[in-house]
Image (tube, helix red, strand yellow):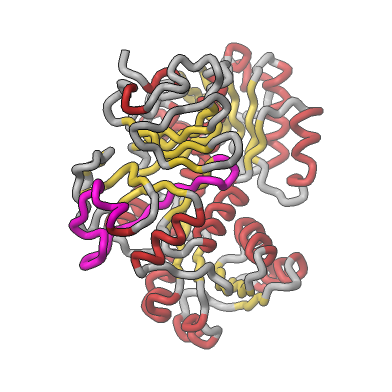
């Protein structure tokens, strides 16, 4: 597929890294150094100039492009860029739109301006953080089928019920129906079978209904109740979206930022939140503001290093009672922190945005009704968890799963019936028309449910 990405910032680079593998990508940016860097690192074309300019888009051959993604720092330029691309004949356009004022008119933009998708990285990342704070026992939590089925990332601790257990014995030991669909162990990615044995340090990915997950972690003795108070450092757009969501959940929220103007603005927008002018890296300030009695600490400033240091300091001061989350955009730092289990949970704006856009592209490639509905990348982006609708024309509906010759490195991780019933698949279960099915696979190009069988 031919794709044009306008804007070579963090999100633009993250998209380029993923999309340049299997697509013909051209990157447009006004900064010649950014364009030079990106074409030196990735197999892409580069054009220097204003992406909203008709002449620049002609130079980038936009009229023969199937998808244009505008990710500059200006919402207005992104919208104008997509409008120009539409006039040049591009069918699919995606704009990054961050301003909260525009979020109320996204439906108008899609219908009247022809935008295929408007994506807000800060709001999407805030939603991911809020999901984790609803279920603090998890490192990461993803939802399928409108929240009916969830996928949780969790690290196996030493001397717990999971350490040394065979998966075939899991239900007998824990008494809850969950499915462990992927395991990361010392750099290796495993789609496990029943004879696989878990070990301390394994990062596991399990699916179940939300209520069953709660029972599972209660039976393990590691359940933590939903956070009721949160301390957020960094009064950014993301902070606004996150704090708004947490306040709507009934949580008490404290916001800390060094910039007095930003604090005043945030205080006006969120009168129910307590906004404090101060340095989030100051451990004395955190102590004075009650970090020891706070359920959640979230570091989302613009500096990855500062977020890591603040998260480590907060974890040390608060002990095991506080859920600590840090926003880390740089991939090298993200990998280091994740691999060493330094912080409870980490989020990356680039990764969240890329996931949503990849989901759209997969659905766009597949015109059939069995296209990708939801996509989440797990195990350091080596594995994908995809949600498909089961259409009546799928050749293997009403066939027991044990009779299907599934591809290697692929697992059916959950089925959501049309009536909302959750099925953790066993050999005798079948797919019925209009089910939603979650497929976990190491094949990162799967875009049709029909392709899950060996040929």
Residue 149 % position (x, y): 51, 45
**Residue lying at the far front of the rendered structure:** 428
- 101 or 242, nearer to the observer: 242
Residue 150 counted in the magenta span: yes
Residue 181 % position (x, y): 34, 42
The total of numbered circles placed on residues is 0
- 422 or 97, nearer to the observer: 422
Q: In this view, does 197 lie to the left or right of 41?
A: left
Residue 139 % position (x, y): 40, 58
Residue 55 counted in the magenta span: no
| Residue span colored magenta | 145-172
Give above or below for 382 relative to 337: above
Does residue 441 appear anywhere in the picture? no
Q: Is residue 219 left or right of residue 434?
A: left
Q: What residue is drawn where x is 54% and y is 62%?
A: 134
Does residue 198 appear anywhere in the picture? yes
Q: What residue is drawn where x is 67% and y is 42%?
A: 97
Quadrant where the C terminus sits is top left
Q: What residue is drawn where x is 39% and y is 59%?
A: 216
Residue 154 % position (x, y): 35, 56
Q: Is residue 220 left or right of residue 302?
A: left
Quarter residue 22 falls in: top left
Quarter residue 242 falls in: bottom right
Give above or below for 4 relative to 244: above
Q: What residue is drawn where x is 27% and y is 26%?
A: 408
């Amino acid at each position: 597929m031919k794709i044009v990405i306008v804007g070579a910032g963090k999100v633009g680079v993250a998209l380029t890294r993923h999309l340049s593998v299997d697509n013909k990508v051209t990157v447009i940016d006004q900064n010649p150094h950014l364009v030079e860097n990106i074409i030196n690192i990735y197999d892409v074309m580069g054009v220097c100039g204003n992406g909203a300019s008709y002449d620049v888009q002609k130079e980038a051959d936009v009229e023969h492009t199937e998808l244009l993604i505008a990710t500059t720092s200006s919402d207005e330029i992104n919208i104008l860029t997509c409008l120009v691309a539409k006039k040049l004949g591009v069918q699919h356009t995606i704009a990054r739109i961050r301003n909260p004022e525009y979020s109320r008119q996204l439906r108008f933009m899609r219908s009247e301006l022809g935008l295929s998708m408007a994506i807000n990285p800060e709001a999407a990342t805030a939603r991911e953080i809020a999901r984790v704070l609803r279920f603090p026992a998890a490192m990461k939590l993803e939802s399928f089928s409108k929240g009916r089925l969830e996928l949780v990332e969790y690290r196996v601790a030493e001397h717990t019920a999971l350490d040394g257990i065979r998966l075939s014995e899991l239900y007998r030991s824990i008494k809850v129906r969950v499915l462990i669909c992927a395991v990361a162990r010392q750099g290796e990615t495993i789609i496990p079978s029943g004879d696989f044995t878990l070990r301390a340090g394994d990062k596991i990915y399990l699916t179940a209904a939300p209520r069953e997950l709660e029972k599972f972690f209660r039976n393990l003795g590691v359940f933590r109740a939903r956070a009721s108070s949160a301390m957020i450092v960094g009064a950014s757009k993301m902070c606004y979206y996150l704090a708004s969501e947490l306040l709507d959940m009934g949580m008490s929220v404290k916001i800390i930022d060094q910039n007095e103007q930003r604090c005043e603005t945030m205080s006006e927008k969120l009168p129910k939140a307590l906004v404090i002018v101060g340095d989030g890296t100051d451990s004395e300030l955190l102590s004075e503001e009650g970090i020891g009695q706070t359920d959640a600490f979230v570091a989302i400033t613009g500096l990855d290093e500062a977020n890591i240091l603040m998260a480590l300091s907060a974890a040390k001061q608060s002990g095991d009672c506080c859920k600590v989350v840090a926003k880390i955009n740089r991939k090298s730092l993200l990998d280091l922190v994740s691999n060493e289990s330094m912080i409870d949970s980490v989020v990356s704006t680039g990764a969240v945005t890329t996931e949503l856009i990849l989901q759209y592209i997969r659905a766009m490639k597949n015109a059939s009704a069995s296209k990708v509905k939801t996509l989440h990348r797990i195990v350091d982006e080596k594995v994908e968890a995809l949600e498909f609708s089961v259409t009546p024309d799928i050749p293997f509906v009403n066939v027991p799963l044990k009779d299907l010759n599934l591809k290697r490195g692929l697992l059916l991780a959950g089925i959501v019936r049309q009536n909302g019933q959750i099925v953790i698949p066993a050999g005798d279960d079948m797919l019925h028309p209009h089910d939603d099915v979650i497929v976990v696979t190491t094949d990162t190009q799967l875009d049709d449910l029909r392709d899950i069988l060996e040929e």
